[in-house]
Amino acid sequence: MALDLDKTRDLPPPLERAKALHQARLAAPFDAYLKPIPEIASSVPSMMSDGERRFLFNIAKDYYSGAGLIIDAGTFLGASTACFGNGVAANPHLAEIRERWQKPIISLELGITNQQMLLSFKRHGIGEGLVAGDSFGPLIEGHIKNVRDLIDLRLGDILETGRIEDQSKGKKLPIEILFLDVLKAPAISEFAFLEYLPRLIPRRSLVIQQDYLSGDLPFIHVHQEYFASKFEYVGEISSSAIFRLVHRITRDEVAALFANPPDPEAELTLVSRAVQRSVDPYRRLIMSFAKLRIILKARGLEAAKQYLSFIESEYADQIAQQQLRRVQNVVRASRYLCEVGAGAGNEREAVKISTGHRGGDHRRTDVATAI
């Protein structure tokens, strides 16, 4: 079955299809997996959108067959796990699924509180008494307790906890749904690709890249688009991009990517392809930050400045919408890099600006005064 992004149904209310940064465009039949979901699967504090939660719940309920495991890599407070768990619990084939998998969902999270999380916990009225460095595992446990028997919850560094132990004499354990919201560093992406991609099932497995439609982690675009010929693009929901595996990926193929990574010009081609995945001009603008960083590395500062000029012209209408802080931060970050040039330290500062974690002295590059 070939996917066609031009054949999509109207999305059910209150999901707003055209709302900036919350576009939802999925190829049939996956556009049907956006139906409203029960409150128990939608009430856990999260940065995921309503549409993303709906999709996770409904694919666990109506798409998941039990042919492989569900890997929930990066659950934070348990929102994605709650969606998957409650969806599987409502799956009409639950009995058969449980015959094959005692715990069909493997949920992975570092689970260590940092200062930024404490501010989020306070806003949601949770985590009283926690300090930076504490485990917030009990919060996750509380959010998934009604479906805990379906979940293998693993707290800690994914490089240590994320391996799928094989209990079947060398036979690989397959993965049917792979949710990735943990790829915050290239080493984690390398681990996840080596460990999980060879376990995907052709014509069945879905990969949900939750950070895909952002510009802060360009290596995600490079790694996923390197295997573009192996996948069909299902579509997007907010910051998530969804892919379905078509052709099997071997571990040797994944190892080859990391043993001989693409040069900067090849990276630029891959990131350019990723930017064009989104139908939302606001998302494409945000993703342009990743492309600008690769241009800076591949072609130098003058080329990056030329691309910045293109961004400011091409997306002038979006930049003018100053109430969208995420968009404004991305433009600030792009302008900052074009002021200071390449360098690991400069990139780190630019990412802080892009994500809203850096202000103060960089307010001099405020978009409102620069255009």
Image (spheres, grey):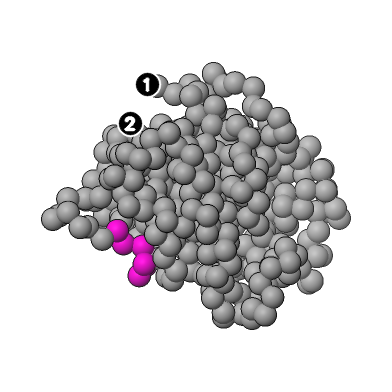
Q: From the viewer's perspective, is residue 238 above or below residue 330?
A: above
Q: Please, which residue is most extreme toward the top here? A: 7
Q: Residue at x 76, y 40 (%)?
A: 318
Crowd around label 1: few <14 · some 14–19 · many ≥20 (10 Å): few
Amino acid beneath label 1: Met
Q: Quadrant of residue 118?
A: bottom right
User: Few, some or many C-alpha atoms within 10 Å of disc 2 (few <14, some 14-19, many ≥20)?
Assistant: some
- Which image quadrant is residue 133 in? bottom right
Residue 254, visible in the rendered structure: yes
Marked residue nearer the N-terminal end (1 or 2): 1
In the image, residue 257 lies at what x, y percent? 31, 52
User: Horizontal and vertical percent for residue 115?
Assistant: 65, 75
Cβ atoms at labels 1 and 2 below 8 Å apart: yes
Q: Residue furthest right?
A: 369
Magenta region: which residues? Answer: 159-164
Type of the residue with mark 2? Arg
Vertical relation: 208 (above or below) 167: above
The quarter of the picture where the N terminus appears is: top left
Q: Is residue 73 above or below residue 229?
A: below
Give the residue displayed 21% in from the left and 50% down from the top.
Answer: 172
Q: Residue at x 58, y 59 (%)?
A: 143
How far apart, in angstroms, are the residues tagged by discs 1 and 2? Answer: 8 Å
On residue 203, the disc is: 2
Per the image, label 2 sits on a secondary structure element best described as loop
Farthest residue to the left: give it: 169
Residue occupied by mark 1: 1
Closer to us: 357 or 54? 54
Q: Is residue 72 left or right of residue 163?
A: right
| Residue 110 left/right relative to 364 | left
Residue 358 seen by the camera? no
User: At which x and y percent is residue 131?
Assistant: 64, 81
